Image (spheres, rainbow, N blue to C red):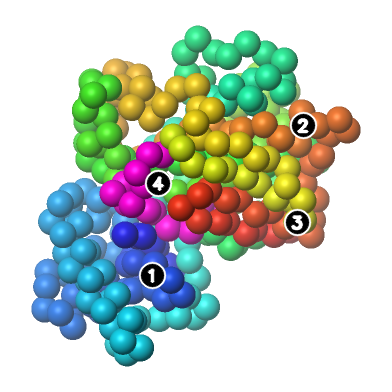
Amino acid sequence: MKLTTFFLKKEKHIGLLINDYVVDFDLAAKRMRIPSFPRDMKEFLEMGSVAMNNARVVHEKAVELLSQGKQSNYLFPVKSVKLWAPVDKPEKIICIGQNYIDHCREQGVEPPERPIVFAKFWNTLNGPSEPVLLPGVSDKIDYEAELAFVIGKRGRNISIDQAMKYVAGYMVLNDITARDIQKSDGQWVRGKSCDTFAPCGPSLVTKDEIKDPHLLKISLKLNGKVMQESSTSNLIFKIPFLIEYLSKSMTLQPGDIVSTGTPPGVGFARKPPVFLKAGDVIETFIENIGCLKNKIK
């Protein structure tokens, strides 16, 4: 399933993305006489298997209707809504730096011995088609295509062999970065946390849809030109290891976002460097998950 958060007439809803339609969980529940859903994805994930099973019931019926060319009051064309960050109120946004072997090579640095962990804040979250805003305090804004996974249930001290049981699903995330701020601050948080600096989505693809998250093509285009192109097979620290590593020091909660790092081709490492400017369009793609298309303003 592809779980989504969207706005309809300025009201936030959660539901499903099915081809060119979104399904409103709240309206579907009333129509099908099943328990109602929360209107927040974090709360949905906290409900666990109960919410997921109800969502599968809705998904099955919606697919049946669409295959027959029928409509319902809980089906809306994607063009009529605004897709938003699938999880827009996570407790944590955890990011991993220098986690692709080919990205380390392009910088001329040795692969890290342990994960480089930093954070982004809520204010960075942005929709899959929404503009990324230049902050005005930096002229070296860079892009970073990344695979993000979302935690599905609470856990601490999770073993590597049990780790994937704690994953709800996957999404595309662009870890936009103000490189000059990142460098001058001596740590990364402020340069990574400007408003709108984490467009993500276009949906949260549940883990049963992805056979192996470490065998996915990942790429980014800037104004139609391919800038990043790699595979998640090049991740240094894989998802189970990251879950075990992080959960040794912090409790992971439903809705927590973990972004796994970016492949080579980032702007600051190019010769000459390439930085984002107003009017640019960036397309961030991961195989079997989807594509973000954001304009720089």
Residue 140's image quarter?
A: top right
Residue 245, image x, y percentages:
35, 19
- Which sits earlier in the primary sequence, circle 3 or circle 2? 3
Magenta stretch: give its range: 199-213
Q: Is residue 112 above or below residue 130?
A: above
* Image point (47%, 13%), residue name: 114
Residue 254's image quarter?
A: top left
Magenta span includes 236 = no
- Which sits earlier in the primary sequence, circle 3 or circle 1? 1
Report helix, strand or loop for mark 2: helix
Q: How far apart in space, not on screen, are marks 1 and 4 (Cα)?
A: 16 Å
Evaluate if marks 3 and 1 touch, with contact meaning CB atoms under 8 Å apart: no
Per the image, the residue denoted by label 1 is 18
In this rendering, which labeled residue sits more in front, label 2 or label 1?
1
In this rendering, which labeled residue sits more in front, label 3 or label 2?
3
Report helix, strand or loop for mark 1: strand
Per the image, the residue denoted by label 4 is 170
Residue 108, image x, y percentages:
72, 15
* Image point (11%, 78%), residue name: 33
Q: Is residue 115 above or below residue 170?
A: above
Q: How far apart in space, not on screen, are marks 2 and 4 (Cα)?
A: 27 Å
Per the image, the residue denoted by label 3 is 224
In this rendering, which labeled residue sits more in front, label 2 or label 4?
4
Per the image, the residue denoted by label 2 is 268
Res. 134 visible in picture: no
Q: Amino acid at mark 3?
A: Gly
Packing grade of label 4 (10 A; few <14, some 14-19, many >=20) is many
